[in-house]
Amino acid sequence: MLSRVADSLYWMSRYLERAEHTARVLGVQLNLMLEQDPRSSDRRWLRVLGSLGHPGSVTENSDPFTRAQTYALRVITGGIASARENARQVREQISSEMWEHLNRLFHEVRRMESAGLWQSQPLDFLAVIVESSHLVQGVTDSTMNHGEGWQFIQVGRFIERAASIARLLDIYFHEFPAGQPMDAGEHMEWIGLLRSCTAFEAYCKVYTADLRPERVAEFLLLNNEFPHSVRFAADHLQRSLEAINQAAASKRSPRVAKIAGRLSAGLMFTPLEEVVATLAQFFADIQKQCARIHTAIYEVYITYPVEAAIEA
Amino acid sequence: MATPGFDEPRIASGPFANYHLDHAFDEMFDSERQPRKHYRALYDLLLKLPAEEMRRKKQAADVSFLHQGITFTVYGRDEGTERIFPHDLLPRIVTSSEWQTIEKGLTQRITALNMFLRDIYNEGRCLADGVVPREMVYSCKHFRRQMRGVTAPKNIYVAVMGTDLIRLPDGRFVVLEDNLRVPSGVSYMLTSRQVMKRTFPELFQHTDVRPIDHYPEALLTTLRALAPEGRGEPNIVLLTPGVFNSAYFEHTYLARQMGIELVEGRDLVVHDNVVYMRTTGGLRRVDVIYRRVDDDFIDPLAFRSDSILGVAGLFNAYRAGNVTLANALGTGVADDKALYAYVPKLIKYFLGEDPILDNVETFLLTEPAERRHVLAHLEKYVVKAVGESGGYGMLIGPHSTAEQREEFRERIEADPRNYIAQPTLMLSRAPCFFDGRVEPRHIDLRPYILCGDKVTIVPGGLTRVALRSGSLVVNSSQGGGSKDTWVLQ
């Protein structure tokens, strides 16, 4: 498969996942804001900005709420436009159904934006993003050949998911350290965290509605059956990279699968007590490993130096 | 539309109520207003089928085009840049003997043009012998001095040619122009046949139409024949300028049909004069490039340095013989509209044969006598800029204003090499379907000629239609459409 095509498929998928995640996080926070003390608002939106990976420049003088809104909208609309543009570049490599749905989503977002839906009905706006993203992913899985190209789509989706959930957890556990008594407000925030990962119902099935931060961490980090847990994402990431390794048959590519395997193994074999004892470290490490996997993918499959490839 | 004169003949039956004949050659009816033999089946069917059924067929064909994504890009529009290619429902039919002449004539033409290209980029015999003036070749903007001394594999410079033929009132096919750089449109020929088979199965059953579906395979065979020596299983790719190109649909279509990789300039790298493509499995050597990128943009080191569509170093790899480009670079010199006037002489010179297909009478405005004559009668001639295509930069004398003629007069006098003049030509007409009625429209024909180990011409081509009544301009950028072309056994 051409490197350019792999690159486009990877980013198409990452951008879509990012838009979906952002829309869900924002939707949850807008909901929580309704029932909360307006005085805590600034802290909330600073937290949202952090969890969405906002670079956090100090020169901005608008209030955190406005800043978070503007930033999230940009991530969502920009993400969908970029996902579509990447798909367009490899139009003949994806199924017509995928292209149609992604293209439709792009035009729908533009329509909703110009109709002012973002201001008047933000929750409806965000719901459309999340639903359409699910639709595109479902259509992808059921209409596209599950070959190398599809595996790159998987890689894009799960690397983005693993990194963004780790970042979200990082911010939450920093703000609400585990092991301290929880008030009603905080209780709502933990539910919010689970909802941001579509995990509330799944969590309840495992642990009942008895919310404890360590359990939330355990569930979102280590559960191997829930699609929005870091472990699940890491497992799928590794599996897809393994499949790509087989398909591409590049001499240097076991390297990527190995790095991904390390992330997956860390999540699989680190004892829970150890994870809980070093949470912040653990979250940071996951994000670092995701970045390393990304770099390795580029070095091995996409932008490898010509000289190295000739000698190989 | 002008009301036809009292004694102007017309076919006054059924859907043909509006079908007027004039002095242009009519593909369906002879001068006695009788349907020609090879159009009889279609004629009978049109009389028999209710208008409603025809409309249904037209609709089904439209939907089919849309679903197959047979579109072309319209530049300069924000949304919906892709449009369906306008097409006409009724096939254009060519008899077996007509086709034989076309086939022989085009084979002769591509053979001579390849010899001419080899000659001007090497020994230059035809220049020394004065068959073509040197300045005519060297002043052509598509002449590539970088190609001096470069010999293409098997001396094939033009592997794919699209030649536009028109039919004069006396029924003869003549060559209007050649396209030797990156001719396009063949995907419309192939897909429109698919659609027609679905739309008119009854007609296919009773007509011996020769198949054209093997074109992609023939193209692949041609490209393979041109691979550098010693490359056992050559890796052949199609190089596209990318999604924004108006023919991108065709590029994806042909790549898919041939089962070869569709690459962009950024997918290719040149190392030690060898071309590779970047794949996830590492670099893979490329042997033949069917390139759909113009000369100017193909290598920023050798040609336009501002091009980002090409591959740095590609030309050197080509010159070293490590990769084949089809078509070769610099072939545009032979489809220059002024050089066109010399093609009959070139056929005679290189092959010792008389041209089987004639040219259209062409006035070279560099010749003082011809220039004086044309300038005195501008209202009778069509003046074309030699380097333009797609119907741009033209003066159509009979439809021009005094002001336009004055403007062209000045332009011609300023740069006579840049223009040629031809008499206004009556293109032949063929029946077209318009909402229940059949009306005649002017058409041309572009067959595609492949040249590898041998010359292959798939029996058919792109018949382009001037969809506006009375119009003689068939270019798709100027309101033209297409028709399926049936060559009979």
Image: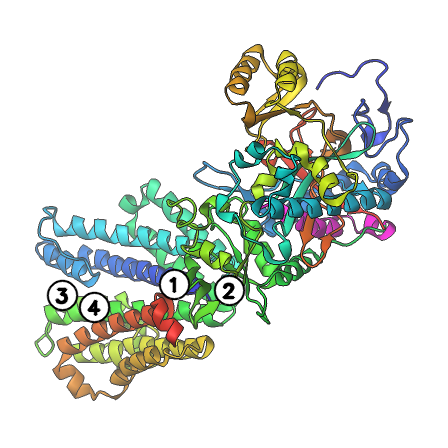
User: What distance separates the C-alpha of mark 2 from that of mark 1?
Assistant: 21 Å
What is the quadrant of residue B29 in the picture?
A: top right
Q: Is residue A19 visible?
A: yes
| Circle 4 residue | A167
Q: Nearer the viewer, mark 3 or mark 4?
A: 4
Residue mark closest to the camera, 2 vs 4: 2
Task: Give me the chain letter of mark 2.
Answer: B
Question: What residue type is disc 1 on?
Answer: Asp
Q: Residues within 10 Å of mark 2 (few under 14, many from 20)?
A: many
Mark 3 belongs to which subunit?
A: A
Q: Which residue is mark 1?
A: A7
Question: Chain for mark 1?
Answer: A
- Amino acid type shown at disc 2: Val
**Residue tagged 2:** B286
Provide the residue designation for mark 3: A185
Q: Residue B314 location, x and y as percent?
A: 45, 56
| Mark 3 or 1: the one toward you | 1
* Residue at horizontal 83 percent and vertical 40 percent from the top: B49
Structural distance between the alpha carbons of marks 2 and 4: 44 Å
